Image (cartoon, grey):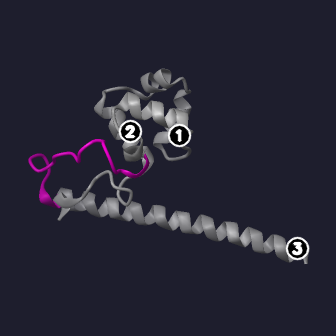
C-alpha cells in the first residue's frame, strides 16, 4: 500500500514540500535558487516552510528554473518529480511508518485550515455582536 502513495499529491505534500524536493533534485541550495529568482533567502525559506507563497510571476519563474510545471508546484498534478523509489533502500516497516506520518501531517494541515476558518468566523461574529 505504501508503494502506491503519490508522494507529491496535495493530501500528502504541501507546496513547500514540492518546492524543496524540486530544488534538491536540481542540487541547488536555497541561496542559489533565491539569487536566481531575485528574492531573499528568507523568502525562499518561507515558501518551503509554507509560511508564504510566491506571486504568479515568481511562481512561473520558479517552475521554469526547477523544470516542473506550475500546476505540479501548486497541487502535485502535471509535470514534476516522480515519487522516490524506496523499494530497495527502506524496510517495509520504515516505509509504512513514513506513510502513516505523511497521512497524519496532511490531517494536521487540514485541521489547521479548519481552525483558521473558525477563528475568522468567530472574529466576524464578535464584531457583529459588538456593533449591536
Q: Are marks 1 and 3 in contact (CB under 8 Å)?
A: no
- Quarter of the image for residue 84 reads top left
Q: Vertical placement of 119 versus 32: above or below?
A: below
Q: Which residue appears at 54% of the width and 43% of the height?
A: 53
- Judged from the image, the secondary structure of the residue bearing numbered disc 3 is helix
Q: Vertical placement of 30 versus 78: above or below?
A: above
105 vs 49, left or right, is left
Residue tagged 3? 130
The magenta-colored residue range is 74-93
Q: CA distance from mark 2 to mark 3?
A: 45 Å
Q: Position of residue 57 (x, y in %)?
A: 54, 34
Q: Determine which of the numbered discs, if any, sits on residue 6 in the image.
A: none
Residue tagged 1? 46
Q: Which residue appears at 38% of the width and 39% of the height?
A: 20
Q: Determine which of the numbered discs, if any, sits on residue 20 in the image.
A: 2
Q: Is residue 82 magenta?
A: yes
Q: Which residue appears at 56% of the width and 27% of the height?
A: 40
Amino acid at each position: 500500500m505504501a508503494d502506491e502513495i503519490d508522494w507529491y499529491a496535495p493530501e500528502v505534500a504541501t507546496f513547500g514540500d514540492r518546492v524543496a524536493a524540486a530544488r534538491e533534485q536540481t542540487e541547488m541550495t536555497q541561496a542559489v535558487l533565491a539569487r536566481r529568482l531575485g528574492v531573499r533567502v528568507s523568502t525562499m525559506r518561507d515558501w518551503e516552510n509554507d509560511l508564504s507563497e510566491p506571486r504568479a510571476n515568481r511562481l512561473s519563474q520558479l517552475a521554469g528554473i526547477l523544470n516542473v510545471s506550475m500546476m505540479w508546484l501548486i497541487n502535485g498534478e502535471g509535470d514534476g518529480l516522480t515519487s522516490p523509489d524506496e523499494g530497495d533502500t527502506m524496510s517495509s516497516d520504515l516505509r509504512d511508518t513514513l506513510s502513516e506520518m505523511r497521512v497524519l501531517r496532511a490531517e494536521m494541515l487540514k485541521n489547521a485550515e479548519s481552525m483558521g476558518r473558525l477563528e475568522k468566523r468567530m472574529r466576524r461574529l464578535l464584531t457583529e455582536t459588538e456593533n449591536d
